[in-house]
Amino acid sequence: MVAQPAASPLVARKASIRVNELGKRFATDGFNLLSDLQRDYGDLVQIAVIPGILNQWMIFTPELAYEILVTHPERFKKPELGKRLFRESFGNGLFFSEGDFWKRQRKLAQPAFHHVRINAYAEQMVAQTQSFITNWKHESVIDLDAAMHALTLSIVVNALFKTDISGETERIGAAMAALGSASAQQVTSIVQTFMPAWLPTEINRKKHAAVMNINQTIYRLIAEHRIRPADKGDLLSMFMAAKDEDTGESMSDAQIRDELMTMFIAGHETSAITLTWALIELSRHPEITTRLQAELDSVLAVRAPTLADLPMLPTVTQVIKETLRLYPPTLFISRQSHQPMPLGGKTVGKNDLLTLVIAQIQRDPRYFDDPLEFRPERFVGDFERSLPKGVYMPFGAGPRICIGNGFALLEMQLVLATLMQRFTFTLADESEVIKSTFGITLGFASSPRIRIAHRAATPLYAELL
């Protein structure tokens, strides 16, 4: 059942909390901070970033979130501060571009994400997962977050390039991790946030070194494709073949690089975080693990999962959707107002920042029974469609919904099915408190350690060992 809140006037309240205090708690106690803000100030919270000049509006109501993303997206833009912070890292790809240029790029990139094209990656996603877990030993303990990042990186590299760069994957992974860490430090510090990109601070130097490291591989692969152009079934081939139907123009090397960087995040970082949290929650809920593995046994027996199996594996899908609800990798969606406009009895100033708090909206007891409980079965049947608009949108919504959401969902479902078919997962330390950190994406204060066990006790799996 979906709880329906009583209609009430939306009132904007000004928070007394200082921005630097907000940043300190944001990094280490993010979920509790968001809950406290909503409890103390309501569904629309005004925070003075630069008093008298720039306000940030924290939005905890799905109605406003939906209006901003879907009903009137033309009234808002991506924040200029975010573009400045991440221009060197992600360039002018789909995530940050605006206006006619964004529309052109979206149109050029869309064929690469057609469901037929995405579905073609399914077999390789499973094969990459099977190869990755070959050396996992019974009763061994692994660094779960690191393992999922390494696995999803190998999958996205294969999808992007269809080229063996196994010798470079570890270096790219380390660079991506360094870039994410430096960026997280930047966005959680008001001083670092406004620091010019050209200033040689420690964070700026780390970001620059990481980007140069990744660029080295991406530009080399683009150059090789230019020399031997062919559609190898990868995203790079699609990007290079795409032409504007009106002008005949194709993407420049720099633009292709920017779009590939966006895909690194969409298909690597977000998927790794979701899979890590899914396995943590399954380790905490053996009854869900039992139900999921019984379903896998019934449908698959000992063969590998395929795309065609997913409709018959509803628990796999439910686990992923519930994980995305409780632990959305993208915690917020940010916009900036083009012009002054009314909002909740107040006036949002031109260029004010609007932060849609996805992480809290998806945990709101007005829409979810026992919202902090991990309950995949809530996503049975038409539950998701029955939710009010704007309540559940882990990939965003509207014209700027994540273009790689189909790829990410397919990847997470098939990887989870493959892992759970072969192993059972338990926390290495049952008393360990898994602490999350907030940054560009959801992270961990320390990587969870998890014990893996072959399902050797089930005769059905003897031949898999």
Image (cartoon, rainbow, N blue to C red):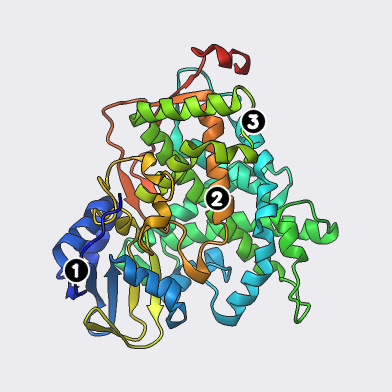
**x and y, in percent, of residue 150 in the image:** 55, 40
Question: Comparing marks 2 and 3, which lies closer to the viewer?
Answer: 2
CA separation in Å, label 1 and label 3:
49 Å
Residue of label 1: 18
Residue 131 is tagged as 3
Q: State left or right for residue 360 relative to residue 162.
A: left
Q: Which residue occupies 75% across, 51% down?
A: 233
Q: Say which of marks 1 and 2 sits in front.
A: 2
Could you tell me how many numbered marks the image carries?
A: 3
As displayed, is residue 410 above or below residue 132?
Answer: below
Q: Amino acid at mark 2?
A: Ala
Which residue is at 51% across, 69% downward? 400
How many other residues sit within 10 Å of disc 3, few (<14), some (14-19) or many (≥20)?
few
- Residue 188 is situated, as x and y percent measured from the top left of the image, at 32, 60
The Cα–Cα distance between marks 2 and 3, rounded to whole angstroms, is: 19 Å
Q: Nearer the viewer, residue 115 or 131?
A: 115
